[in-house]
Every structure is written in C-alpha cells, then in structure tokens.
Amino acid sequence: MANDIKKNQSKEERKSSLLAAMVRDTIARMTADRLLGPKLQKGEIRKNLVEPAWKCPSCFHVTRIDLPNCQAELLSLVQNPNPERVILQLHGGGYIGAMRNIYRSFAGLYNELGRGINVFTPDYRVAPEHPYPAALEDALSAYEWLLQIGCQPEKIVFAGDSAGGGLALALCLYLKDHGRKLPEGLILMSPWTDLTASGESYETNYTRDPLFGNTRDSMIYNLDYAGEEDVKNPYISPLFGSYEGFPPMLVQAGSIEMLLSDSVSLAKKAKAAGVKVRLSIYEEMFHVFQMGELLLPESRQAWEEAGKFLRVLDRRRQGACSALEEEDLYKPDSMDMA
C-alpha cells in the first residue's frame, strides 16, 4: 500500500513538472514571436486588453466603491461573511496595467483561503498618464476607507503581486514613516521591489526567464511610473526602505524569473531588521506563476501556502503559535484547500 502511494506521488510530481514545462515553453514561444513578443513583454497587450464582463459566482457579492481618484471592489461571501478581517489586494501590471478579471479570481481564492475573509481591490491609477505618486495615493485611500468602515489594522492583510507587491511594501513604508498603524501581515507574489534592476538575477536569469528574458526592452525596465522621481525612492523601489517594525511577510518567487533578486534581497534585508519573513522560491517557476491558480500544481501549492500563512497570522494574533507550531502549520496536508 505504501509503495503504491509513493508511486502515485511520483507520477503526480512528474505530471506537475511536465505541466509547468509546457506552460513555460508556451510563454517562451509567445515572447519569441517578433510581432506578439514585444507587445507582451512591454505590457501593451495587458494594458489594451478588452475583457468580457466578469461573472461573479453566486456565492460572492461584489460592492463597488468610489474612492477619491479611483474605483475599488469589495468581495464578500453572500452567506456568513467574515466582516472583521480583510485583505487589501493591490494588483500587478507594471504600474501601467489596470485591474483585470484575474484579480477578481484572485479575490475569490483569497476569500476561500481565509475562510470567508473579505477582499478589497482598488483599481488604482496607472502610468504613464498617472505616474508616481498616484498608485501610492490610491492605495492609501483604499486603506483609509477600510479604517473608516471599522476595520482594525491588526486584522488587515496587504497582498500584491509584481508591481502590486512593491506597492504593498511602499504603502507599509509610508504608514510606518508617518506613525500610522501597520497591517497584520503581507503576502507578496514575485514583488517588484527594485526598479533600478540592479539585482544579480537580472543577469543570471536573463536567458532563462520565459516572460521578460532576452531583452532590455520590457516593462521591468519601464520607468514611466517613476517619472521625474529618483528611482531609488523607497516608495517607488521599496527595497531601499527601512523594515524595522514591519509585520510578518510571505514572499514567493520563481527560481527562473529575472526579478528573483527583488524577493531574495527584500527577504534578507527584512530579516536583518528583525522581521518574520517566509521566503519560498519555487523551482523552475516564472514571474507570478500563481496566475495558474489551481490548475498548475506549483501554483496551487503557492496558494495553499498563502492560506497557511493566513492561518499562522490568526494563531499569532491569538498568542497561540510557537515557532515549532508555526512550521507544523506549513507542512503538507495541514490545511489543504477544498
């Protein structure tokens, strides 16, 4: 019986690697296309994409909120919502792409992972029409709106991918610098923390990254968001900020993405400042591979880890989670998604 289980596990592992390889190859072929590739890498396709109206699953309710300079969406369960906790989700897109339907799907996943947690996603202003500090201002407005309706900072989690991950960090830095209360934690997926592109992975993964590799003409070298500002401004490149006093963070990255150093350097700096950091590097994975949601096994594993991180935050807030217990919570099968 045990041998059969091991055989099945081995088959699943091979299947996972094969599926991931197929996705990587597909992305690489698309970016290698002379007509499609540059538009994909520069974010033009993402920016100009026309999507059908999102069909909200019947189990969710979406409330559209008008913030001072942008709109936002609050996703909650129709039955038995959890109004006390909320995730402030800041979407990616290189600071040039608006919110897309994939982030509405992300909101649904966060809701499931957090056992009914509300998810608030601002469609913040983007460059080049709205350079820095527009995105940060809108993120701050979203956070302040949550406080105004009664949400407590210690029950708010910031989450973001790519530019959204950098923006989540920038918002945290801004709050700290202005003596404001910080959130309970941060979930960062392939965060873009260094717009100077100075990390070693920009070179070592140059030919390996299927999305941004083999070119210097892509959105990760686009400084439209920085505008006339110093790109080392910590609110633009949060890697250059100070992390003393920051809440716990989960940082996920793919081993072959050019932005890998953005995550590794962030984790190293935050840990040196005394921050509780869980850095997970997924082998042979690419930038924001979590967009595979539950279809790509590696992506599913990353989302499960995010759910376990939320559970750890719950236990830490209750004062009932030792370091050993925390590691146990991250073990496989300790909290699988349904």
Image (cartoon, rainbow, N blue to C red):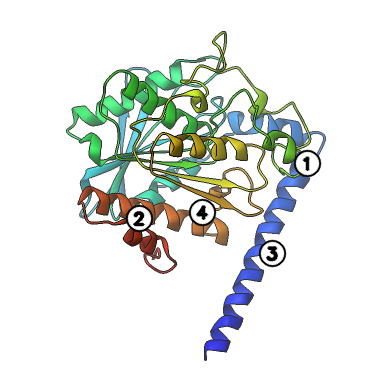
Alpha-carbon span between mark 4 and mark 1: 26 Å
Q: Residue at x 55, y 36 (%)?
A: 265
On the image, numbered disc 2 is attached to which residue? 112
**Label 2 secondary element:** helix
Residue 258, horizontal then vertical, whole percent: 67, 38
Label 1 or label 3, whichever comes before in sequence order: 3
Q: Is residue 123 left or right of residue 32?
A: left
Nearer to us: label 3 or label 2: 3
- Residue 18: assigned label: 3
On the question of residue 224 being in view, the answer is yes
Q: Amino acid at mark 4?
A: Glu
Q: Nearer the viewer, mark 4 or mark 1?
A: 1
> Which one is nearer the viewer's eye here, 236 or 266?
266
Who's the residue at 54% across and 48% down the image?
291
Q: Secondary structure at mark 4?
A: loop
Mark 1 crowd level (few <14, some 14–19, many ≥20, 10 Å Cα): some
Quadrant of the rendered image containing residue 41: top right
Residue pointed to by mark 1: 207
Tell me the quadrant of the picture where the C terminus can be found. Answer: bottom left
Q: Are marks 3 and 2 in contact (CB under 8 Å)?
A: no
Query: Regarding mark 1 in the picture, which secondary structure is present there?
Result: loop
> Which marked residue is nearer to the observer: mark 3 or mark 4?
3
